[in-house]
Image (cartoon, helix red, strand yellow):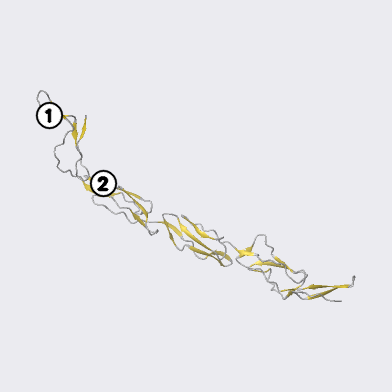
Amino acid sequence: MGLSSCSNGVPTVVLVLLFLSSTVLCDCPTPALPPKSRPRGSEALKDSYRTGTVLRLVCIPGYEFIPGARPYLTCSPDGTWTEVTELCQGKRCPVPHLENGKILESGDLRLGERVTLGCNLGYRMIGESTLRCVLRGGEVMWHRELPFCEQIPCHRPATISNGRYDADPTDSYVVGTIIIYRCDADYSLIGNPSITCRVAADGVNGEWNSPPECKKVRCLKSPLPIFRSQRKERRSGKALALGTASRQCLTDGIPRRPLLWE
C-alpha cells in the first residue's frame, strides 16, 4: 500500500476495504483570509482543517460583503482552500447634505475615504471643507461636524452728502442686496442711483460698487437765446421770432440750448 503526497497539507490515509485500496486525503493548513474578514463566531483559526471543512467568514466592523462575493472557504481534497480574494468593502458614510452648498470631490463615501464640500455662489463656508469617513463605536461616520454655508455679508452702505438711502430695518446686507439712493431737494443725482452687494475678489467677503453723488443745480448766466429764424414785419420793419424758446439747467450748471417749436 502506497501513500500519495500532499503538496500543501498533511496526508490522511483512508482504507477502503471493499476495493482493498487506499486513498490519501490531505488536511488544509491555516487559511489566508481575504482582507478585512475573520471567521464567523468566536473560534480562533486552527493549525489544520479536515478535507471538506467549510470555514464561514464575516467582515470586521466597518466593512460589509461585496455583492455577489462568496463568504466562505472550503478545504479541498488536495489540501488547498478555495480562493476568495475580494470579500469585504468599507461601509458608506451618510451623504453630506449641505444647505446652499454641494459636493466638489468624493469617492464612494466609504470608510477611509474623503469628501470635499463647497458653497454656492454668494455663500461662504463656516468650518472645514474636507471630511474623512471613520469608524467610531462600531459605526461609520464623518470625523467632524459638517460645515455650513452662510450668505456673504456686506458692510453698511456708505452715506453720501446731500442724499440718502432707505436702510434695512435689520441693518443686514448680503450679496445680492440692492440699495437705491435719492438726493435732497435742489440736488441732482450724478451716476447710477443703485449699488449692489457683490462677492469680493477674495471670494469670502462682500463689497459695494461705487455710490452716486448729489450735486447742487445752478445755472450759469447765458446770453439771450438765439432763435432759429426771424422775419421782418413789412409794415413796422421789426424783427419777429418764429416760435417760442425755453431753457433748462443741466446738473453741471450749464444751460441747454433753447428749444423751439414751429
Q: From the viewer's perspective, is residue 197 above or below residue 75?
A: above
Q: Which residue does the numbered mark 1 point to in the structure image? A: 239
Dot 2 lies on which element?
strand
Amino acid at dot 2: Leu
Residue 248 horizontal/vertical position (percent): 20, 39
Look at mark 2 in the image and give the residue it sits on: 189
Amino acid found under the numbered disc labelled 1: Ala
Residue located 63% across and 63% down the image:
64
Judged left or right of residue 236, residue 15 is right
Query: Whole-percent x and y of residue 246?
Result: 19, 35
Q: Is 249 positioned to the left or the right of 20 in the image?
A: left
Q: Is residue 153 left or right of residue 66?
A: left
Q: On the rendered image, what quadrant is the C terminus found in?
A: top left
**How many marks overall?**
2
Q: Position of residue 31 (x, y in %)?
A: 70, 72
Q: Position of residue 108 (x, y in %)?
A: 56, 60
Q: Nearer the viewer, mark 2 or mark 1?
A: 1
Quadrant position of residue 121: bottom left
Camera-side residue: 51 or 23?
Answer: 23
